[in-house]
Image (cartoon, helix red, strand yellow):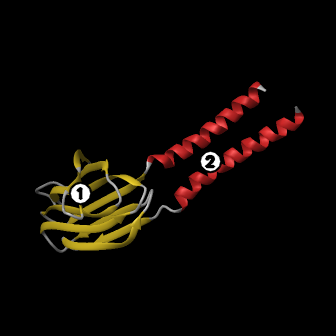
């Protein structure tokens, strides 16, 4: 029986190591790409493909212009992506006062044929900032993130989206955790 106890401990250690490795490999490859705009009307095209867990941040700070906001970022999602999730925050200080004021903001994601795939949903206002979120199913391909609005005064807008991995990535992680739990249970019973 002592021989099997050592085997069980080794199997438990191996299962823990495999689970940790699978988790770390997914995180090690995640990248954040940032696009900074300092004008109301701008476009950018990102090189390479977005993978599982990658994040795109669009940061806009405009202090010398007012008028229509129209910004677009083109990006490509790689294999294994099944969705996007994100949020947007923009400053909407009082209508009569000083400070940034961006109104009528709408954020959409279109596919390569300009078909609307995901649109943001307004979440509300908190402390002078408006917030919206978006979440939707999407597959590999080329997409355009488009932000529109009106800068009454200076404009501050931040958008962040993340690529959601396919379910088998989560299934692998859960299987590893389940194996660890099963081995621990068998160890207690044996």
Q: Which mark is residue 19?
A: 2
In the displayed structure image, the side of residue 82 where residue 14 appears, left or right: right
Task: Name the residue nearer the viewer: 118 or 134.
Answer: 118
Task: Name the residue nearer the viewer: 18 or 95.
Answer: 18
The vertical placement of 178 against 34, above or below, is above
In percent of width and height, residue 50 lies at 40, 64
Q: Which residue is mark 1?
A: 91
Q: Quadrant of residue 178?
A: top right
Q: Residue at x 32, y 62 (%)?
A: 141
The quadrant in which the C terminus is found is: top right
Residue mark closest to the camera, 2 vs 1: 2
In the displayed structure image, the side of residue 108 where residue 104 appears, left or right: left
Q: Residue at x 22, y 47 (%)?
A: 121
* Mark 2: secondary structure: helix
* Mark 1: secondary structure: strand
Q: Are marks 2 and 1 in contact (CB under 8 Å)?
A: no
In percent of width and height, residue 171 lies at 51, 43
Q: Residue lying furthest right in this view?
A: 2
10 Å neighbourhood of mark 1: few (<14), some, or many (≥20)? Answer: many
């Amino acid at each position: 029986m002592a021989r099997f106890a050592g085997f069980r401990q080794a199997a438990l250690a191996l299962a823990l190591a495999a689970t940790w490795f699978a988790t770390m490999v997914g995180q090690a490859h995640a990248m954040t790409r940032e696009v900074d705009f300092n004008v109301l009307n701008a476009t950018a095209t990102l090189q390479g493909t977005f993978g599982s867990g990658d994040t795109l941040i669009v940061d806009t700070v405009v202090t010398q212009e007012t008028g229509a906001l129209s910004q677009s970022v083109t990006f490509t999602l790689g294999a294994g992506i099944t969705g996007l999730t994100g949020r947007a925050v923009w400053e909407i200080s009082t209508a009569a006062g000083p400070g940034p004021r961006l109104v009528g903001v709408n954020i959409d994601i279109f596919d390569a044929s300009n078909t609307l795939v995901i649109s943001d949903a307004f979440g509300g206002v908190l402390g002078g900032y408006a917030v919206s979120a978006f979440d939707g199913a999407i597959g590999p391909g080329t997409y355009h993130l488009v932000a529109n609005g009106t800068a009454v005064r200076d404009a501050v807008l931040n958008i962040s989206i993340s690529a959601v991995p396919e379910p088998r990535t989560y299934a692998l992680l859960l299987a590893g955790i389940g194996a660890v739990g099963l081995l621990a249970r068998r160890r207690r019973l044996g």
